[in-house]
Image (cartoon, rainbow, N blue to C red):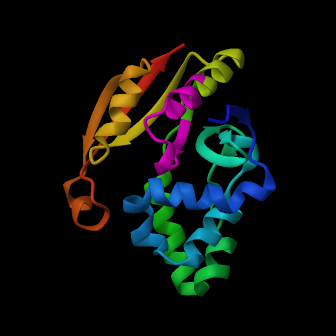
Amino acid sequence: MAALTISRGLAEPCRDQAALLYMEAFRPLLQPLLGDGPRGLDVLARSMNPTHAFVATRAGRLAGLAGIQDGGGSLLDIGLPAMIQSYGLAGGSLRYLGMGVLLSRRRQPRTLLMDGIAVAPEWRGQGIGTQLLLAVCHQARENGYRDVRLDVLDNNPRARALYERSGFLVVKERSYPFLQRYFGFSAVTEMRRPL
């Protein structure tokens, strides 16, 4: 089996692969707003900030992706122009507002936010997610952060188990039962890993 490489930064040729991987991982959250077609993938690909990504590659293919959010931006910096270009003025504006509500999280000083983590289905269960998390935590420590924060949805127990094995602790849980019908989840658990 080819060696796994973890690196910081998303190479331009990998944008489309990264968008597809991100959509597969977060389909319940993204599909109601972006749909399943090429327009949603195009918005994701054009909105990814390569400097806010950690990538896992194997045999030249993208095996996993982890995003971060800091004062300089986030992995997904979806702008109104990108939404309007793909969905028109009315549809793009409404989708932009919806994405803002779903993706907005309050940053705290000296806490690095995770902006999603995804591993390709064929490579799950091989420790790639763990290695991506370790790379993010190492980088955060090197840059003076005191902890790393992430949010996990209640419909993703595998991800929560990964985070717990990687030293993340539950801080609080928030319930949103009205979202179950549209997005397939009804609670979000905030987790942190001290550095």
Residue reaching furthest right? Answer: 12
In this picture, is 70 found above or below 73? Answer: above
Q: Which of 193 and 9 is in front in this view?
A: 9
Query: In screen coordinates, is 48 left or right of 148?
Result: right
- The answer to whether residue 14 is seen in the rendering is yes
Query: In screen coordinates, is 17 left or right of 149?
Result: right
- Residue 168 percent across, percent down from the top left: 41, 22
Residue 38 occupies which quadrant of the picture? bottom right
The quarter of the image holding the N terminus is: top right
Q: State the residue at coordinates (38%, 37%).
A: 159
Q: Give the range drawn in magenta.
A: 114-134
- Residue 5 percent across, percent down from the top left: 70, 32
Magenta stretch holds residue 24: no
In this picture, is 54 found above or below 176? Answer: above
- Residue 149 percent across, percent down from the top left: 48, 29
In this picture, is 74 found above or below 185? Answer: above
The quarter of the image holding the C terminus is: top right
In this picture, is 39 found above or below 53? Answer: below
Q: State the residue at coordinates (49%, 48%).
A: 122
Residue reaching furthest top? Answer: 195
Query: In screen coordinates, is 137 left or right of 154?
Result: right
Residue reaching furthest front? Answer: 1
Residue 109 occupies which quadrant of the picture? top right
Magenta stretch holds residue 123: yes
Q: State the residue at coordinates (50%, 40%).
A: 106
Query: In screen coordinates, is 155 left or right of 47?
Result: left
Q: State the residue at coordinates (28%, 67%).
A: 182
- The answer to whether residue 109 is seen in the rendering is no
Q: Nearer the viewer, residue 63 or 97?
A: 63
